[in-house]
Image (cartoon, rainbow, N blue to C red):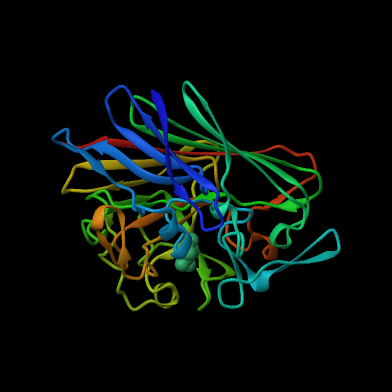
Amino acid sequence: MSIRVKEFGKTADGRTVSIYRITNANGAYVDVLDYGCTLHSICVPDKDGNLVDVCLGYDTVAEYEANDGYLGAFIGRHANRIGKGKFTLNGIEYTLAVNNGPNHLHGGKKGYDSVVWATSVASDRLLFSYTSPDGEEGYPGNLSLSVIYSFDDDNALTLCYDAICDSDTVVNFTNHCYFNLNGAGSGTATDLLLQVHADAFTENDADCLPTGNIIPVEGTPFDFRTPKTIGRDIEADDQNLKNGSGYDHNFVLRGEGMRDVCVLSSEKTGIVCTTATTQPGIQIYTANFLTERKGKGGATYHSRDAICLETQHFPDAVHHDNFPSAILKKDEEYHQETRYTFTVTK
Ligand code: BGC
């Protein structure tokens, strides 16, 4: 594995953004920005051995700053929604930035996706660090974070998140990569095959906020226990699908500890992405709100041209005692890991 760095551009307020290329022994590579620890490109071999970029992104910092959608970004302090942007911890009510209808989404108006992270390069990994100050976007406690990316010779991209806080707080980190295994910018991702090792999902209201109900996938369009195309049931007459304009739901993953949780594959390129994680949930988001826009290399992206596989704690866990807790206690060590491994079928 080798890592080289180049300047990518500057933010509107003059911060320099660098792009790091992690190349493995086979020539496959991942490009990462220090702006938001953003996965910019993931170039892996298809069934004929040609490299295909399977990750959506932009050519300039200005586009990352101007557009919504969090393409490729690391998300925190709390991924997905917190109802009404309020929660109570140890008897104190905290008010967060509200940036998605009535709710708080993906860390608020200035989440970790727009931070330019301090970066250090080791021979086998890229390490990003940031201290999120007490009160940032309304969250309690000074939170020290490290995010480590590595890409090995088996085309496994591993993302490790560690954090510690000087007071009790809530945390939920994810990565918001938009995958299209047919190739980024090649059109719809609805023909990709998806399997998710989940027997249930969390029901959403019309604002995509969990109601607290956990629904078995059996007999619903959310049953991905055996592989089916993303598009097969996406237009089914189902209130949950209508609420998300497609899939935009947290799946309750089987098991615990580091385990395989979902498999995405393309019949066109033969590329298969197996996701493993330590996290309890995954937001399967079919890019329903990806409005038409210009992407990398002159491509045009549209709604449903990608899928996000956002490993996470359940959204709004702070309001639902039946969800795994997202509270991080003072001085407790937070650690989560997610691995996307790219292989091919012939
Ligand atoms: C959310 C979507 C949101 C998207 C981009 C996903 O994680 O669940 O509702 O539109 O991120 O912000």
The furthest residue to the right: 91
Residue located at (84% from left, 64% from top): 92
Foreground: 9 or 330?
Answer: 9
Q: Which residue is situated farthest in the front direction here? A: 14
Q: Give left or right: position of 112 versus 165.
A: left
x, y percent for residue 315: 58, 61
Quarter occupied by residue 285: bottom left
Which residue is painted at 62% across and 56% down in the image? 78
Q: Is residue 292 above or below residue 262?
A: below
User: Is residue 225 visible in this depiction of the protein?
Assistant: no
- Residue 112 rendering spot, x and y as whole percentages: 59, 52
- Residue 289 occupies which quadrant of the picture? bottom left
Query: Looking at the image, which is closer to me, 154 or 131?
Result: 131
Q: In the picture, which quadrant includes the N terminus?
A: top left
| Residue 219 in the image: above or below residue 49 | below
Q: Tell which of 239 and 36 is nearer to you.
A: 36
At x 41%, y 51%, the residue is 177
Question: Which residue: 61% across, 52% down?
Answer: 172
